[in-house]
Amino acid sequence: MRVSQSLFQTQRDSSSDAQLVSHQLLIRTGLIRQISAGIYSLTPLATRAINRIIQIAKEEMARVG
């Protein structure tokens, strides 16, 4: 599947409010969306990524003991 056909949208330019590189990348990759001034929401893609990171951390902690 092409990225253009996926359910999330990416942006070429980051918003002018974003000053940090990490903030700009989160906006450009479509992981967060700005709702209003200073308020952002996570997209379903970001939620899925966070859940996967949590799962990996739990597995590694269980393996270590």
Image (cartoon, rainbow, N blue to C red):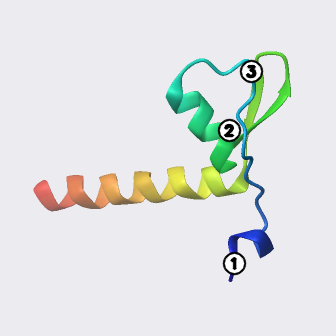
Residue in the image at 74% along x and 21% along y: 16
What secondary structure is marked by label 1? loop
Q: Which residue is the extreme one toward the front? A: 12
**Residue of label 2:** 27
Answer few, some or many: residues within 10 Å of disc 3's Cα (few below 14, many 20 plus, some between 14 and 19). Answer: few
**The image quarter in which residue 39 lies:** top right
**Residue of label 1:** 2
Q: Are marks 3 and 1 in contact (CB under 8 Å)?
A: no
Residue 38 vs 29, above or below: the answer is above
Q: Earlier in the sequence, mark 3 or mark 1?
A: 1
Residue in the image at 72% along x and 38% along y: 13
Instruction: Tell me how many marks there are.
Output: 3
Residue 50 vs 56, above or below: the answer is above
Residue in the image at 53% along x and 55% along y: 49
Q: Quadrant of the N terminus?
A: bottom right
**Residue of label 3:** 16
Labels 3, 2: front one: 3
Q: Is residue 17 left or right of residue 19?
A: right
Q: Amino acid at mark 2?
A: Ile
Label 3, label 2: how far apart the Cα atoms are:
11 Å
Residue 48 screen position, x and y as percent: 59, 58
**The image quarter in which residue 9 lies:** bottom right
Answer few, some or many: residues within 10 Å of disc 2's Cα (few below 14, many 20 plus, some between 14 and 19). Answer: many
Can residue 31 be seen from the camera position used here? Answer: no
Residue 2 vs 16, above or below: the answer is below
Q: Earlier in the sequence, mark 3 or mark 2?
A: 3
Q: Quadrant of the C terminus?
A: bottom left
Please name whichever residue, 26 or 13, is drawn nearer the observer in this view of the structure: 13
